[in-house]
Image (cartoon, rainbow, N blue to C red):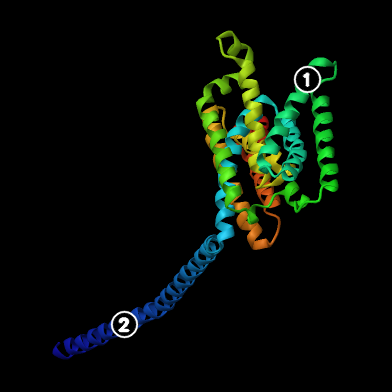
Amino acid sequence: MSATAAERGERFGSRHAARVERAKNLSLLRLSTIRPVGHHFRIGAYEQLGLGLHKCVLVMEFLLEPLSYGFMVRALLVSALVGGVCGLLSCFMTLKGWALMGDAVSHAVLPGVVIAYGLGLPLSLGAFVFGVGSVAAIGFVKQMSRVKEDTVIGLVFTGFFALGLVLNSKTLSDIDLHHILIGNVLGIQGAEIVQICLISGIVLLFLLIFFRDLMLFCFDPTHARSIGINTGMLHYLLLGLLSLAAVAGLQTVGIILVVAMLVTPGATAYLLTDRFDRMAVIAVISSMSSCLLGVLISFRTDSSPAGCIVLTQTVQFLLAFLLAPRHGVLRRQSNLST
């Protein structure tokens, strides 16, 4: 019995030792398979962290490097200011349906710029006078003839623009027609900055004072007239502010593309909301951001700032046109399919 017990104890001990050895080997195997995975995981995390930091550095470089140049700082500030004012005014232009009127005023200022230069006057003064003059000419021809308003607008602004081209070709001046047509925001100087700030401040002040009256006038002029609002005064006030905004945008995007700044932000915001106060906020943010981004893109791509600003606004409008939550094309298509 004692031998048998001894043998059993020996066999039990050997089996226990074998189990311990197998458990040890299994634990080592598990550790050997886990450690490389953890090692690779740590390396992947570090690589992802480095890639993320690299992207952040590139973004910061894209945003901050232009700020080391004085002309870029001036261009960004002026563009944002003009963009904000034009964005707010574009809401009223969109509701009133005055896109063609904005085009007319922006083109009609060219002869005023040339004449003001010849007389030694501020260019903004001549541009404003001819902008208001074009509006008065449109109203006069419309009242005194049977021609429709859109036709009159086309006739007046092309006539004024042609007059400006002729005067510019006959006047010996240092004015670069290219800068007048598409702007020169990168070359803007102190006196011009003061003029733009003054004009933008005037437009913004009148828009804020008559905000609700202008809103009602653009939505329903008949109701506005019935409750005692002077709609005639608001009509010419809005046209005057349009002329001033066109003069301010003259230095930023030129007289050809300034109509985009007076129409596109409001049209973009119109697709994104049904409330006018939200529309105004969205339009201002959209216009200012597109101006800042457009100037930065032009710096990086060595291209026209005016073209980049307007293209950025166009992209924003296309995104709203496709992806707007209520009025976007894709949303409408999904509603029709359901």
Quarter where residue 16 is shown: bottom left
Q: Check disc 1: other Cα within 10 Å, few if <14, some if 14-19, many if 20+.
A: few
The residue at the far top in this view is: 226
308 or 18: nearer the eye? 308
Secondary structure under the numbered disc 1 in the rendered image? helix
Amino acid at the residue labelled 1? Phe
User: Looking at the image, is mark 2 or mark 1 earlier in the sequence?
Assistant: 2
226 or 41: nearer the eye? 226
Image position, residue 275 (x, y; %) = 54, 27
Amino acid at the residue labelled 2? Lys
In the picture, the disc for residue 106 is: none
322 or 64: nearer the eye? 64
Q: How many marks?
A: 2
* Alpha carbon separation for disc pair 2 and 1: 101 Å
Q: For mark 2, what is the residue? A: 24
Q: Is residue 226 above or below residue 44?
A: above
Image position, residue 88 (x, y; %) = 57, 34
Residue 142 vs residue 56: left or right? right
Q: Check disc 2: other Cα within 10 Å, few if <14, some if 14-19, many if 20+.
A: few
Q: Is residue 199 visible?
A: yes
Residue 1 vs residue 219: left or right? left
Image position, residue 20 (x, y; %) = 28, 82
4 or 188: nearer the eye? 188
Residue plotted at (73% across, 27% down): 135
Residue plotted at (60% across, 11% down): 225
Secondary structure under the numbered disc 2 in the rendered image? helix
Q: For mark 1, what is the residue? A: 140
Q: Is residue 330 visible?
A: no
Say which quadrant the C terminus sits in. top right
Image position, residue 335 (x, y; %) = 64, 31
Q: Is residue 283 above or below residue 21?
A: above
Quarter where residue 260 is shown: top right
